[in-house]
Image: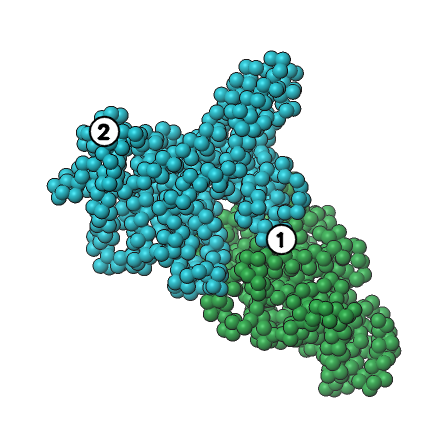
Chain colours: A green, B cyan
């Protein structure tokens, strides 16, 4: 489909407006909006004529500003570390060094440094490596502790609220990532504009270890609650399982999903297969009709645009029948909100009917269509977020994480590339993912003389007796196994492993174990 | 309670009969019955006067004979191995050696030996170690393949049928063992006289790794089936979780549960705690009333007698309120069936009311009482089985297993001490149990120059797509991890690891992987 032609046709139809509907014409000046030609931006969505702006009527630009604030605040807690440490390093031969260093850290980073490290600096110099690792963990801890305040910036403004999902017929939305990839961590609030909570969650699995069984357990937990009346309105609602694969529009064979050797076709088919397997497993076990609804979504990690694959009447998805939100953005930027919505709906329905598909397989159920339309629209905001707040596309397309998280990912920091994540219960089964992480950090940290910070994190349930103790035992076991796997790094103090636990019911959030009072009654 | 006094009182009451009710007086002669004084047997249940027999009116001695046949058949498949191999060894310099060896193996063991091993014998002698390991695995495979025929001897004569359990109010009975112990493997048909099936099953866990979560998943699976109407009569039924701890009446500090350092008090309290934890976890997650019923049972592994702990009205169990079936046997041997049943019921009710307990906590629900009475009565048959078919108590009280099974236990061979079992998903978490197994087999095999046979076995579900492939990957990973853990044994060919998979829905039963056609469409 030739986009320029399409837009010209829409302009001729009178639906194309030169300014945004409902916005004061001069408000643009205070926004970081881009005019085509002003900056050359390389974004497939933002293909506009001279004098036009990438400002879409359906985009929540206030929300984008808030998300940008959130991102700046969170990243700022990490980005200042090196500068502060350099300044401190320069002070290390001063008389009142320790005191000045602590003051600097408190002022600029918001936390103290280990006094011992500062006091011992006169002997053989300041241990910058240890300070750096300390700061990475400490900055992450600050993020965790400020989760509620930080997220309050945007949490209530998300487009896809739990109430909306319920109205579409879904009591739970479980989203799976096929691979441990830091670039996908902000998915829910940023890319999907979905408020994460206990029943709207993201899980990352390594491809080889993705287990239908684990998904069946998650589904089963909610199914018991639903069947026993524990979900208001649940009798007419279903569980929605979303599988996300990812690709890179700019480097399709370099920055895609490493597990699939950046083979996009394989990634989409493998994600589809897993969704199908889950449905088949549940239907064969619990009967026809028991299976959750599924949705297959592709993410272009360069620009955060989506390919939303459209289920048919039976809920089956197809790797080749989808809408691309970058195209939708391009085709509807400059339209009124109403005209843009109508166009998106039309394109979705066209895609459903592609090659007469709908005749044979039927169209998706109304609740799913409602959700797909809302998701496509919500994602337009993220496309514009990348255009306005990341200069058109992410400058760092590869890995740029601050640390490795092994075990279970925390949900406190919802942001791209904060940490590399290896989902595992044991290193024995997750070794390949940890190896990839260590390789990445060999480039990011070790070759600059910095240690690789590894956070071993597990959740427990304060409702389940003994759960915390078991989670701690598991963390200790994984920590020991990681240290045993990389003895050369450990010996050179180039790998620093710490443990943290979180309660699913929030009595503790990512509490570093050596800081917690043991047996404190949790 | 002084047992002799009790029995004297019963005799005085006229309920005590000199011969068995309903049995011809001379039938005794053809049974392997013991008269006190004939053989001195050391069994706490069989304390009888001169001329009396340990033949209890409530014992199913026909079933005992059948179980004895089953045991002889299964053990016979292993016990002949060494003799056959010795004979074969003696032939190895004969001209037609290979042919004669194969004939001998086929005749006496029922399967062939690896031709290559026989053909190469002339070079550096027959590899007896390899032959022995081959035979152990092969004999086990024969047992698996003959499961249905073998079990048909006794399966339909079990006292506690699924129908009976349903009448007591239980749609499922999940029994957990706290430790990987070969002595507890015949528990369901022998000790409990319960027909094992998909919903009446036994699981062994190592103490440290026992996970309430895994039990919640098992419970949750059946709860979804029940709530969605998949269990006939399920609306008024519950799940029953039984925890079994074990002890040795003869060697209370040597042959008890190794995990609890043979500390019986710790074993019982730890089993009780786990049951409580499961109930609390389910109630806190799914609401009051959701929890399964529980039963705590102690097993004396010398004589297979039970301590059945009696739940109160709330279903809570107590470590100190139980009936001991060895005592019940002793007190009721020689009574009529009716009088014995009445006595057992009376003793159960006395125990319920012990120290006024029932006033405060109430008595167990009728269905549970019915089950406890039936279990106590059924176990009398096993007590007599040990008296008559194992000369009063097991001669081998310690470990005497044929091989190590790591992963998931098979349920095809329901027999004491056939294999040492280490329940694990990864060696990283199950290392302690595997180490114990290797230590045991260092005594049993290695010090005699024999290899330790290790079978890595996992179940998959043919209803879950991809499940077999994942189970196979897991088996390969565990096999590699075991071999990596004991390099010295592997180098000396003193550890031989093989892999097998079973389908929970019986399309494959313990199929050795290198024998299966890969990718055969399962």
Q: Which residue is mark 1?
A: B465
Q: Can the viewer see residue B112?
A: yes
Left or right of residue A463: residue A316: right
Could you classify mark 1 by the number of other residues whose Cα lies within 10 Å: few (under 14), some (14-19), or many (20 or more)? many
Relative image position of residue B271 (x, y in whole percent):
38, 48
- In this view, which residue lies farthest toward the left? B12
Mark 2 crowdedness (10 Å alpha carbons): few <14, some 14-19, many ≥20: some
> Residue B491 occupies which quadrant of the picture?
top right
Chain containing the residue with disc 1? B
Q: Is residue A415 visible?
A: no
Q: Quadrant of the C terminus of chain A?
A: bottom left
Question: Residue at image x 74%, y 55%?
Answer: A266
Front one among A109 and A468 = A468
Q: Is residue A298 left or right of residue A293?
A: right
Q: What residue is at 24 percent from the left and 50 percent from the top?
A: B345
Task: Quadrant for the N terminus of chain A, please.
Answer: bottom right
Left or right: B17 in relation to B475? left
Identify whether B310 is placed above or below B485. below
- Per the rendering, the mark at residue A206 is none
For disc 2, the marked residue is: B36
């Amino acid at each position: 489909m030739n986009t320029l032609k399409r837009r010209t046709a829409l302009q001729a139809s009178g639906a194309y407006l030169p300014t945004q509907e409902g916005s004061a014409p001069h408000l643009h000046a205070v926004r970081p909006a881009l005019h085509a030609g002003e900056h050359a931006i390389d974004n497939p969505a933002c293909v506009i004529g001279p004098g036009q702006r990438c400002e879409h009527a359906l985009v929540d630009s206030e929300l984008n500003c808030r998300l940008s604030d959130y991102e700046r605040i969170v990243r700022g807690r990490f980005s200042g570390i090196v500068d502060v440490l350099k300044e401190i390093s320069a002070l290390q031969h001063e008389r009142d060094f320790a005191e000045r260093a602590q003051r600097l850290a408190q002022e600029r980073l918001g936390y103290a440094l280990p006094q011992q490290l500062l006091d011992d600096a006169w002997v053989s110099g300041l241990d910058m490596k240890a300070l750096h690792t300390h700061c990475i963990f400490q900055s992450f801890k600050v993020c965790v502790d400020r989760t509620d305040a930080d997220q309050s910036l945007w949490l209530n403004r998300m487009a896809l609220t739990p109430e909306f999902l319920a109205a579409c017929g879904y009591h739970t939305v479980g989203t799976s990532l096929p691979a441990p990839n830091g670039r996908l961590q902000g998915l829910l609030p940023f890319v999907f504009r979905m408020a994460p909570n206990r029943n709207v969650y993201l899980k990352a699995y390594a491809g080889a270890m993705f287990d239908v069984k684990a998904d069946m357990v998650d589904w089963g937990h909610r199914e018991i609650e639903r069947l026993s009346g524990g979900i208001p309105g649940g009798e007419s609602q279903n569980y929605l399982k979303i599988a996300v694969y990812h690709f890179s529009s700019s480097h399709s064979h370099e920055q895609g999903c490493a597990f699939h050797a950046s083979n996009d076709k394989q990634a989409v088919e493998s994600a589809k297969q897993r969704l199908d397997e889950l449905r088949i497993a549940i239907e064969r076990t619990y009967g026809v009709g028991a299976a959750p609804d599924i949705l297959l979504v592709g993410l272009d990690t360069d620009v955060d645009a989506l390919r939303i694959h459209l289920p048919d009447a039976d809920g089956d998805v197809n790797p080749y029948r989808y809408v691309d939100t970058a195209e939708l953005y391009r085709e509807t930027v400059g339209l009124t909100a109403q005209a843009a919505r109508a166009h998106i709906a039309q394109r979705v329905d066209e895609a459903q009917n592609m090659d007469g598909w709908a005749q044979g397989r039927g169209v998706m159920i109304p609740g799913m269509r409602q959700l797909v339309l809302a998701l496509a629209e919500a994602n337009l905001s993220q496309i514009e977020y990348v255009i306005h707040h990341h200069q058109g596309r992410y400058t760092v397309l590869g890995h740029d994480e601050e640390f490795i998280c092994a075990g279970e990912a925390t949900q406190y920091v919802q942001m791209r590339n904060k940490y590399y994540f290896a989902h595992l219960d044991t290193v024995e089964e997750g070794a390949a993912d940890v190896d990839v992480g260590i390789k990445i950090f060999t480039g990011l940290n070790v070759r600059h003389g910095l240690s690789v910070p590894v956070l071993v994190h597990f959740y427990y349930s304060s409702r389940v007796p003994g759960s915390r103790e078991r989670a701690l035992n598991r963390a200790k076991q994984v920590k020991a196994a990681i240290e045993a796997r990389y003895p050369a790094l450990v010996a050179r103090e180039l790998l620093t492993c710490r443990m943290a636990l979180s309660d699913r019911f929030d009595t503790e959030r990512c509490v570093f174990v050596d800081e917690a009072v043991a047996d404190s009654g949790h």
